[in-house]
Image (cartoon, rainbow, N blue to C red):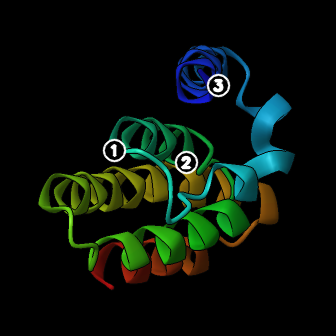
Amino acid sequence: GRREIQYVVLTSIRVLVQDCPSAFAPFLPDFYVKALDPPFTRLIKIDILVSLALEPAAIEAVLSELRTYIRHGDKSFASAAVRAVGRVAELSRIVYDRHGQTTGNPAKERKTANRIALD
């Protein structure tokens, strides 16, 4: 059925995102969890979102989205969202350090990463 196809496609994307996240970055909002997504789909989408949090704008968008999942009634999904926030916060330090080297303002970027980690 439709759900089985969605599962196969998303698990394939999850693998591909590891190798080439930039190919999927423009489609970030397509991986947001929808109200009618089955539980297995929600968890895969969280993994994909974390993998796509590789630029400052994407980090902000992913964290904003994950924060809405934390209040979800499904406790295992909410727990997965909390763990994902932690993973994105860790990644943000690396991304913002790299971004700071590019912009020539590492102190400002590190401060931003710290703010994200603590919010």
Q: Nearer the viewer, residue 36 or 12?
A: 36
Which amino acid type is shown beneath numbered disc 2? Leu
User: Gap between marks 3 and 2, in whole Å?
Assistant: 10 Å
Would you name the residue on which mark 3 appears? Answer: 17
Tell whether label 3 touches label 1 (CB within 8 Å): no
Disc number at residue 39?
Answer: 1
Q: What is the x, y in percent for residue 36?
A: 50, 58
Disc number at residue 49?
Answer: 2
Residue 48 higher or lower than 92, as above or below? above
Left or right of 39: which side holds 3? right
Secondary structure beneath dot 2 equals: helix
Kindly identify the residue that appears in the image at 24 percent across and 51 percent down: 80
Q: What is the x, y in percent for residue 48?
A: 54, 38
Secondary structure beneath dot 1 equals: helix
- For the C terminus, which image quadrant? bottom left
Which amino acid type is shown beneath numbered disc 3? Val
User: Gap between marks 1 and 2, in whole Å?
Assistant: 16 Å
- For the N terminus, which image quadrant? top right
| Mark 1 / mark 2, whichever is N-terminal | 1
Tell whether label 2 touches label 1 (CB within 8 Å): no
